Image (cartoon, rainbow, N blue to C red):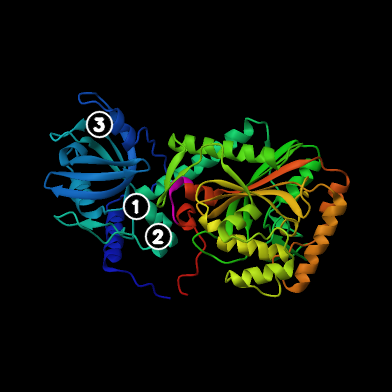
Amino acid sequence: MSIERSEQELVRRESLKKLRELGVDCYPAELYNIDNSSKNIKETYNDGDELNVVIAGRLMSRRIMGKASFAELQDSSGRIQLYVNRDEICDGEDKTLYNQVFKKLLDIGDIVGVKGYVFKTKVGETSVMVKDITLLSKSLKPLPLPKSDSEGNLYDAFTDPEKRYRQRYVDLVVNPEVKEAFVKRTQLTNSMREFLNNRDYMEVETPILQPIYGGAAARPFKTHHNTLDMDLYLRIANELYLKRLIVGGFDGVYEFSKDFRNEGMSRFHNPEFTQMELYVAYKDYDWMMDLVEEMVEKIALDLHGKTDLQVGDNIIDFKRPWKRQTMYESILEHTGVDISKMNELDLIEVAKKLNIQVDKTMGKGKLIDEIFGEKCEKNIVQPTFITDYPVEMSPLAKKHRKTDGLVERFEAICNGKELCNAFSELNDPIDQRERFEEQLELAKKGDEEAMVLDEDFLRAIEYGMPPTAGLGIGIDRLTMLMTNSTSIQDVLFFPQMKPENQ
């Protein structure tokens, strides 16, 4: 199969050939010992200081001016100007390094190492006087760099979302501001870990390949283990395994988990996503609400130094305490209809009047979920705990201590989307079995998201599980909020995409 290459790609391959003929190793193996960065140099250098540096990065621009040239080097922290003088880098009679290698055979995008000293130009720009330049990696594809005209208008910017997500490696080079969201994501998870570790909760790992998928209502991805000759599922949640550890005697366990749900894709959904799940013994959902708002407030302060953040058109304030409202109260507020005493037939009629599509697979829980999702959730902007869900919606949550037909569950809703889900965990094995059996009936009706019965999990809680509060919080969604990102693809390095030829 022949590969069509652009004219620029052919020129670069020819340059590679000529460099090799000159004896230049275009992909050297030895260590290049960097001792500084462009950002640190700019922030710490004072005019007149003697500062020798070794830095490395990509050549992003060049201005050739006879015996001397200016160039721009971009490393992981930013950009810095280079001053390349022929007689500085070629101190003998042989000027090949400057006249041939630098001027003619290096290209924008090449990765180089530079040794030299720092100075300020006449216009006050901090720059590096290059004493030695080493090619570390020859770039064979030209970068899609934006160009600007004399009036400051920008052209050929690498902005097409599909190209950016598909070629994130290019996106990060030519749009360095993109890095900030991913830096913030790491800071977010570090902040959360610090918060949980300071409470002596233990970070653990549980299986990604599971013989029975459980812990959530979702369609799984299915695979086959050849040696064991059995079907396995990529986990949709890690809840049931973490609860097994609570049975085993841990007081608090958490896991940053990659979960997988074989469902639709959108600005808010990727089939592979990250959750943090936490289970703490001898606690309940009221206690967990306090923990969530304290933890998220801390994250906002750690990332931004404040709790009120611009998210789209809204200013969202994560400062404690957050509003708390029952699901029935929320539906009443947003629709004017009190559904708290309604049966399945009544709910079908209400849904139809509210122009919500229903089908025969929907049980009571699914109908309430649809009404809330369509009429309430998208209108909740400030962080709000929606509490006390119908029992039919929550097969793993403990029955409400005061109100029949409800469970002790909350979701934190913010900017119109679910941020987290939490329960006072069901630890009654007989009740749990009955709930699983009800889910089997829903599956028979055609509900593809109904939970399956996990006999080993039931066996575990038959040994006795202490009262427990559990939490699942979506890291991708939280990162979107904390970075003012409009799409989940903007906070995932490599979002799932169709093959390029489709």
Q: Identify whether 33 is placed above or below 312.
A: above
Q: Report the residue at 58% width, 33% height from top.
A: 194
Along the viewing direction, whichever of 54 and 390 lies nearer the viewer: 390
Identified by mark 3, the residue type is Tyr
What is the x, y in percent for residue 225? 73, 63
Q: Which residue carries the number 2 mark?
A: 164
Q: Report the residue at 50% width, 69% height from top.
A: 498
Answer whether residue 381 is magenta in the image.
no
Along the viewing direction, whichever of 228 and 380 lies nearer the viewer: 380
Q: Which residues are magenta?
A: 482-486
What is the x, y in percent for residue 378? 52, 58
Question: How many other residues sit within 10 Å of disc 3, few (<14), some (14-19) or many (≥20)?
Answer: some
Q: Which residue carries the number 1 mark?
A: 175
Quarter assignment of residue 331: bottom right
Q: Report the residue at 77% width, 36% height from top.
A: 282
What is the x, y in percent for residue 72? 25, 45
Identified by mark 2, the residue type is Arg
Q: Identify whether 213 is placed above or below 39.
A: below
Q: Which residue carries the number 3 mark?
A: 117
Ranked by sequence position, the earlier of labels 1 and 3 is: 3
Q: Report the residue at 23% width, 37% height from top.
A: 130
Choose mark 1 or mark 3, whichever is in front.
Answer: 1
Count of numbered circles on the image: 3
- What secondary structure is found at the residue carrying circle 3? strand
Ranked by sequence position, the earlier of labels 1 and 2 is: 2
